[in-house]
Image (tube, coloured by chain):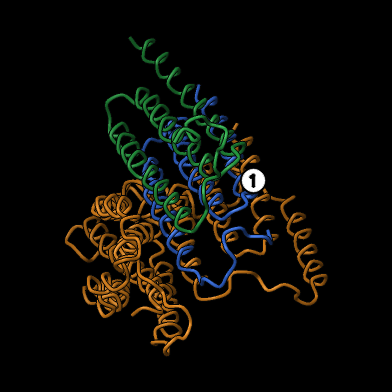
Chain colours: A blue, B green, C orange
Amino acid sequence: MYYVVIIATLATMILALVRALLGPSVYDRVLAANMFGTKTVLLLAVIAFLYGRPDFLDLALAYTLINFIGVLAILEFIRRRAPSSAADHDTGS
Amino acid sequence: MSLLLHVSSWVLLSLGGAFVFIGGVGVLRMPNLYTRMHAASLTDSMGAALIIAGVMLQAGPSLAAIKLAAILLFLLLTSPTATNALASAALLAGLRPEEDTSSPEECGE
Amino acid sequence: MTVLFGVFLLTLIVITALAIVQTQHLFVAVILAGIFSLLIAVIFFLLDAADVALTEAAIGAGISTMLFLAALTLTAEYERSGSANRLLALGVVAVTTLIMIYATFDKPRLGDPAAPVQQHVAPWYLEHTPEAIGIPNVVTAVLASFRGYDTLGEVSVILTAGIGVLFLFGAKPRRQSGPQRIAPHEPGRGLRHYLIPRVVGQLLIPFILLFGLYVQFHGDYGPGGGFQAGAIVAAAFILYALLEGEAQILRVLPQRLLTGLIAGGALLYGAVGVAGILLGGSFLDYSVLAANPITGQHIGILLIEAGVGITVTGVLISVFHALAARGSV
């Protein structure tokens, strides 16, 4: 029963990774990274139950908070970068 | 009773998995940053709520259920905020949502 | 099934690593590196190494990404292309990879009970932890008590790294002629647009700090400990710095306090060691710290984990300040 959810979540993680690799602007990639993070939290929660170790849920809780802070940090530093650099459409990727 | 618990847990988990996968497909196929944000954030919250509710039914009343409730609470609080911050940042940086000239209410104004 | 998940995740790691190497836009590389760290954390989790997974998620996927980004604001955004002698580097890497793959042919299967690594020290630790130290988490027992010297070395490494960064970046830069950095709370700069993250962030900071304290003291019973807790508490303060601006957080946590924390944590660790000598045992012998040796072990582990957490918090916040506050203080 858990395997259905795990496979769905892993598939979504692949799709988010593809968007992070493809996305033309930096914000697409940040969106994909945020989504990847929340899917990882769900994956950790389900796997912790699948393997019968509910005390590993601390990892999921920690990463939920860290993901949020990470996304805000990325957005803040994108805003702060030198204005002379190219706009958000990066070409050399 | 236990059978009902298992069945409802399975239903919730499957629905949650379906939502999460639909969100992934949406992020990949939507044409624009803002539409992708819709796909990612809505399905994120709904899928997370369903999956965690399903796992909580399996856990029963225990410390693990409280931790799962805490994870759900923080996910529901932080994920939409992150999306809001992302949308604000993209808007302020100048990424305009594309104009949709085919919808009737645009022409009516 | 675990093997299937593991292989799948390892494939994703290879794809991400190739993308990191191939891209020229450094912001993208940093974001992908965060995803990479997260995948590694999930693999550690699958291998039942929860402490390591928590540390990798907190520090690798979280703090590391933020520090890289803060450093990127000080430098160029695109990789400078055209370095010499790519072919020689490629050749060296290929030969090393082939040698390492050849070396894994002799490796025992994962989890094999007859493997050499399971024969000598590991069963000794597993047997002696309940009677000598009495805490459920054997990883913390090994880290903090049986191998206390190594952890003292780790704290010294973190201390040295912090000192190094503060030496390099701590000096006030000369007046810059480029565009000024604008702190997010400066009026007239679109404060309204950041209202929701500010409110939610301020709501969350006490809970993140509380969770950091929980991870610190719960390390005896579950995954946790000083390193992870230090990273989580530092992340909470970095969130405050992002939301309220550098000037505000430097009022809350002045640099002298942070320097005190950096040195104080390592000092606490060393002091516990010396207290062991003064009370009649050897350096870092916790059994003499109290009347009952097991209570002494508990007290010793508590104090040194606190020392580790304090130093890690101080160093991470100081490094963040050194990189992020560099134009505006």
Identify which residue is drawn at 65% across, 48% down.
A22
> Where residue B4 sits: x, y (%)?
37, 10
Is residue A31 visible in the rendered structure shown here?
yes
| Residue at 54% from the left image edge and 24% from the top image edge | A4
Instruction: Determine which quarter of the picture holds residue C133.
Output: bottom left
Looking at the image, residue C221 lies above or below residue A49: below
Q: Nearer the viewer, residue C256 or C289?
A: C256
Q: Residues within 10 Å of mark 1 (few under 14, many from 20)?
A: some
Type of amino acid under label 1: Leu
* Residue A42 picture location, percent across and down: 45, 36
- What's the residue at 26%, 70% (across, down)? C248
Q: Count the marks: how many?
A: 1
Which residue is nearer to you in this view: C106 or C248? C248
The quarter of the image holding the C terminus of chain C is bottom left
Q: Which residue matches tag 1?
A: C12
User: To which chain does the residue with label 1 belong?
Assistant: C
Would you place residue C199 above or below residue C273 in this image? above
